[in-house]
Amino acid sequence: MIKVLKEGLFSTIQDSGRFGYKNIGVPVSGAMDQTSAKLANLILGNDESAAVLEMTLLGPTLEFLNDTYISITGADMNPMVNKKKVLLNETLLIKKGDILYLANSSNGMRTYLGIRGGLNSEKILGSKSFYKGITKKEKLIKNDQIEFDLSISSPKKINQNFNDIKINRNSKIKVFKGPEFGCLDPISQDMIFNNEFTIGVNNRMAYNLVEIIENKIPSIVSSPLMPGTIQLTPSGRVIILCRDCQTTGGYPRILQLDKKSLDCLSQKVTGEKINFYLNKSL
Amino acid sequence: MPVKRNNIFFKVFNEESILIHWNDQVNLKLIDTIISYQKLIEQELSEVLIECVQSINSMMVIYDPNKINSEDLVKTLQKLNSSDVKVAKSEKKIWKIPVCYDLSFGIDLEDMSTLNSISVDEIIKIHSSTTYSVLSMGFLPGFLYLGVNDKKLYCERKDKPELNIKSGSIGIARDQTGIYPQDSPGGWKIIGRSPISFFNVNNKSPCFSKPGDKIKFQSISFLEFNKIEKRKNSYKIKYEVV
């Protein structure tokens, strides 16, 4: 069991997502940075889609009520067990009564805490990922208790090299052309690939960009969306949809982030710059 | 009888999804075509399929890229589209949804009455005598897009969305009507409220209805609203099989 001593800014339980219910309007959810969540699990020998804790900008303080093994990946929240600094991307032995402190994040926005065996919270519609209206909880609050598997004593011996799932931290965001990309005038099309964009207001539902792209495309009938879809609103606002996005929408879909770039984007904070590059691999 | 499907386009959307778009006029017939194609895909491609997301003139097919590549999947989808494979028949239902059109729930009834030069009674009469089709779902878990409204009920969304529309509220936007399955912000004009529960994650099928079904609203009094609301969790929504 883990007890939440301080809740931090916004911490949720996430797994690889909720599948099979998009057709009735249920978002896929799941960890924003799937690469880091997967890494947290693989380090411990867990199933790569096991439930982890996603912590945003300011981490919580957590007390462990049982012995276990943990791993911490993603943004650096200067993690300390009791008073001692611990490393990211390593297996860490935790003893009953140990307290994990996570501070402000640097070099990213989201940190992932993996637990040997995965977190045990309620599974709703096939997933443990928190989402308002689906799971009872939207985020962790002080005094919450999270269960985990106690039957597993030690992490599996891992011989895998994790270099191929290292997190991409640069400003390059790779995109495919969206269904309505061709409706943009050539000047706007060029502008997208020749300019820097700034991260604006953002959350698990979407990242807004500060810059405006003039939009003369009429709105479309409400159509399916995916995490990573870039919508252009009538006023020219650029919205990059993320894991908790709606399943359908009526704004033109000008671009689509590739999956690695969506993970990379979810580590960007307000004010950071990004550049779009065309991914021609499809 | 196999449904003839023409004017259909396939686009590789990302590493794990194909968007299928129909360049036809949006109508109920097209929605039936899309839904039966979706059923066919679910029936024949379950090995590689993760899920389909249907809308009124397109559908996203989300698949497992470890099991099939996009090129082969598009070919398979095209082949399936022109095949004579039959879809397992499922019954279509007309669901009877009780709605109280009291002005305390239908907060925009009077506004609509003025805008459309039509009496409140007539709005209620038209809305509760129309049989609506479930066109698609989205926006919120369990939100039903229903169409098509009588022209007399046509109205634009509110300029400023309401911050808290109550669960069960019945709204109108343009030629569609919809039910809010949970408390949420929203910009549709609200004409009434249903006392029943529309989305329950503890049920195997969390939503009572699915695209392709039909819905009829039945006007109930304020007293009946309170009576049904008290037992909303055990209330069985009545239906007829078409």
Image: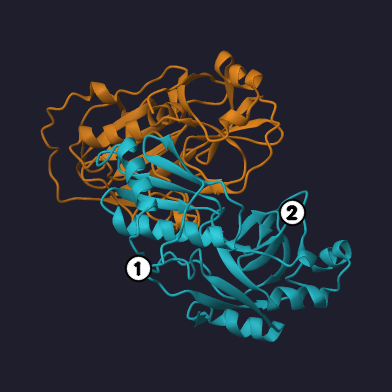
Chain colours: A orange, B cyan
Q: Is residue A1 left or right of residue A142?
A: left
Q: Secondary structure at mark 1?
A: loop
**Number of disc labels:** 2
Residue at image location 61% in from the left, 45% down from the top: A250
What amino acid type should be assigned to the residue bearing mark 1?
Ala
Residue at image location 57% in from the left, 53% down from the top: B139
Q: Is residue B204 visible?
A: yes
Q: Is residue A123 visible?
A: no
Q: Position of residue A242 (x, y in %)?
A: 49, 38
Q: Nearer the viewer, residue A119 or B119?
A: B119
- Chain ID, mark 2: B
Callout 2: 10 Å neighbours few (<14), some, many (20+)? some
Looking at the rendering, which quadrant does residue B217 occupy? bottom right
Point out which mark residue B40 bears: none
Q: Nearer the viewer, residue B110 or A52?
A: B110
Residue assigned mark 2: B157
- Chain ID, mark 1: B
Q: Nearer the viewer, residue B30 or A248?
A: B30
Q: Position of residue B242 (x, y in %)?
A: 50, 79
The correct choice, above or below, for A263 with respect to A6 in the image is: above
What amino acid type should be assigned to the residue bearing mark 2?
Arg
Label 1 or label 2, whichever lies nearer to me, is 1
Q: Is residue A270 left or right of residue A142?
A: right
Q: Position of residue B232 (x, y in %)?
A: 53, 78
Looking at the rendering, which quadrant does residue B192 occupy? bottom right
Mark 1 vs mark 2: which is more N-terminal?
A: 1
Q: Position of residue A259 (x, y in %)?
A: 39, 32
Given the current orientation, which residue lies at the most extreme top position? A194
Marks 1/2 same chain: yes
Residue assigned mark 1: B88
Q: Is residue B166 left or right of residue A68?
A: right
**Quarter occupied by the N terminus of chain B:** bottom left
